[in-house]
Image: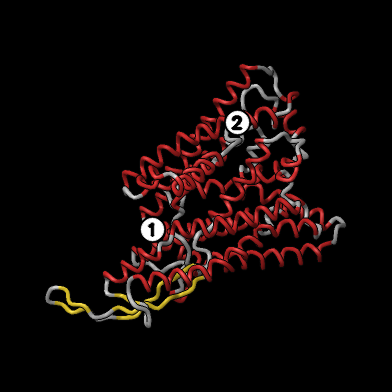
């Protein structure tokens, strides 16, 4: 069977095998750490108090793989680092000093990474203080007081920094993007329980087995839609003229420049979801603002989320794709788009096409992101509805495709067949720059 042959090919390449084993080892460490409860907390009382967690808490807990509700040392996970990354990306637009660093190449990138780490500590201190004060019930704390709050805050900051380090090491020594994989593994960890809960609820009378089968069939269609969104491209023909290099003449030819419908990948989803977590931590839980942002199935929550996703899709696409730079590289290599003059005209042409495909792509991305609210209204249980499209599913699909693409690149580099039959290749972004 081809599947068995692909597995053999993967593990026959020592470098790829070592990277996969390293990745799995680091992810295992993360999952084990998510079950280590903060010192001074009665885990049984905490479990009873957090059993009925819903709304925003359930959504955050899904990203953290259950660590949030368990008051784990990794309760805040990687989200403070993502929040800090978002701030640095936004600052790169408004602050000239950061803009200058972005243009300095590797040295500037290292400096920005270091500032992001410092900012992560500040964000974790703020979020950790809110978490200790609002999410840990007083009856679950054995010896409440200043000492407990201080030690718990230090441990939460250390835990987040350790998870950030794990993500960087996976990116460096493993396969795939470490930070994205950590988010994905947390999401997948809560999927079996949500799936079983939905199955038991349906079979025991809420629609029956037939309704459950219909629900799963529709779920598979949503997954296919997400895959189409992630892999959809608009191919722009590029013609290369004949060129002479030394004593050799190279024949020109036609290639295609693939412009992705969703060039920003899963980053707008992560950006928007992270921002939606901030207001409840800044306002009292009894305030109207916190009430709106604490209900992921409410109208205003999903409306604001959709607007943020559309805005961030344009913002991040502008960061990762520069029509001017592509046009200059094509001109240097003797390439041109048929019927379009090289240089500025080509840059404008590419920018126009990108704007046209980004609009429907961003709207579709936003619609899929708010689809769990419709699933919940249709009777799907809350835990499973969070996977019915939405942030969770899009992140899982995007990260899995990115990781498979990297595995396929290793196979092709070593002269093996890819993961797909008939020469088809997995399309998608090979990395998520902000996350690494």
Q: Whole-percent x and y of residue 292?
A: 74, 45
Could you tell me which secondary element the residue under label 2 belongs to? helix
Looking at the image, which residue is at 76% across and 41% down? 288
Q: Is residue 21 visible to us here?
A: no
Q: Is residue 124 above or below residue 219?
A: above
Looking at the image, which residue is at 68% across and 39% down? 280
**Residue under numbered circle 1:** 12
Around disc 2, counting alpha carbons within 10 Å, would you say few (fewer than 14), some (14 to 19), or many (20 or more)? many
Residue closest to the far right: 205
Q: Whole-percent x and y of residue 204?
A: 85, 55
Could you tell me which secondary element the residue under label 1 belongs to? helix
Q: Is residue 126 above or below residue 237?
A: above
Residue closer to the observer: 357 or 398: 357
Residue closer to the observer: 208 or 218: 218
Alpha-carbon span between mark 2 and mark 1: 45 Å
All told, the count of numbered labels is 2
Q: Is residue 405 above or below residue 184?
A: below
Q: Whole-percent x and y of residue 293?
A: 70, 45
Q: Is residue 429 left or right of residue 277?
A: left
Q: Is residue 264 left or right of residue 373?
A: left
Q: Whole-percent x and y of residue 236?
A: 43, 76
Looking at the image, which residue is at 21% across and 78% down? 243
Residue closer to the observer: 406 or 289: 289
Q: Quadrant of residue 417?
A: bottom left
**Residue under numbered circle 2:** 128
Q: Identify the image's colour scheme: rainbow, by chain, secondary structure or one colour.
A: secondary structure
Q: Quadrant of residue 303?
A: bottom right
Q: Is residue 198 above or below residue 423?
A: above
- Which mark is on residue 82? none
């Amino acid at each position: 069977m081809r599947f068995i042959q692909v597995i053999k090919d993967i593990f026959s390449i020592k470098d790829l095998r070592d990277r996969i084993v390293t990745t799995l080892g680091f992810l295992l460490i993360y999952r084990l750490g998510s079950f280590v409860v903060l010192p001074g907390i009665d885990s049984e009382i905490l479990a009873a108090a957090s059993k009925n967690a819903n709304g925003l808490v359930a959504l955050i807990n899904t990203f953290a793989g259950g660590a949030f509700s368990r008051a784990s040392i990794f309760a805040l996970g990687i989200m403070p680092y993502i929040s800090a990354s978002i701030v640095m990306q936004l600052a790169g637009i408004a602050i000239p000093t950061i803009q200058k660093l972005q243009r300095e190449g590797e040295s500037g990138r290292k400096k920005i990474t270091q500032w992001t780490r410092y900012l992560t500590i500040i964000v974790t201190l703020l979020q950790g203080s809110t978490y200790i004060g609002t999410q840990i019930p007083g009856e679950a704390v054995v010896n409440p007081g200043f000492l407990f709050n201080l030690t718990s805050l230090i441990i939460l900051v250390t835990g987040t920094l350790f998870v950030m380090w794990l993500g960087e090491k996976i990116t460096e020594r493993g396969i795939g993007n470490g930070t994205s994989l950590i988010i994905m593994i947390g999401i997948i960890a809560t999927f079996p329980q949500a799936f079983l809960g939905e199955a038991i609820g349906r079979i025991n009378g809420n629609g029956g087995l037939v309704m459950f089968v219909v629900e799963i069939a529709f779920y598979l269609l949503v997954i296919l839609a997400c895959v189409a969104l992630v892999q959809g491209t608009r191919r722009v023909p590029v013609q290369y003229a004949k060129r002479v290099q030394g004593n050799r003449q190279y024949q020109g030819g036609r290639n295609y420049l693939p412009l992705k419908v969703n060039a920003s990948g899963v980053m707008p989803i992560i950006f928007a979801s992270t921002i939606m977590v901030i207001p409840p931590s800044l306002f009292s839980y009894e305030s109207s603002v916190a009430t709106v942002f604490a209900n992921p199935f409410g109208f205003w929550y999903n409306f604001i989320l959709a607007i943020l996703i559309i805005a961030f899709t344009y913002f991040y696409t502008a960061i990762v794709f520069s029509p001017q730079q592509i046009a200059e590289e094509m001109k240097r290599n003797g390439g041109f788009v048929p019927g379009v003059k090289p240089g500025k005209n080509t840059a404008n042409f590419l920018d126009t096409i990108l704007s046209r495909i980004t609009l429907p792509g961003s709207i579709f991305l936003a619609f899929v992101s708010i689809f769990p609210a419709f699933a919940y209204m249709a009777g799907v249980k809350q835990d499973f509805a969070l996977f019915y499209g939405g942030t969770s599913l899009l992140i899982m699909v995007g990260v899995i495709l990115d990781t498979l693409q990297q595995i396929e690149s290793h196979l092709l580099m070593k002269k093996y067949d890819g993961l797909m039959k008939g020469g088809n290749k997995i399309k998608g972004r090979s990395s998520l720059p902000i996350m690494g």
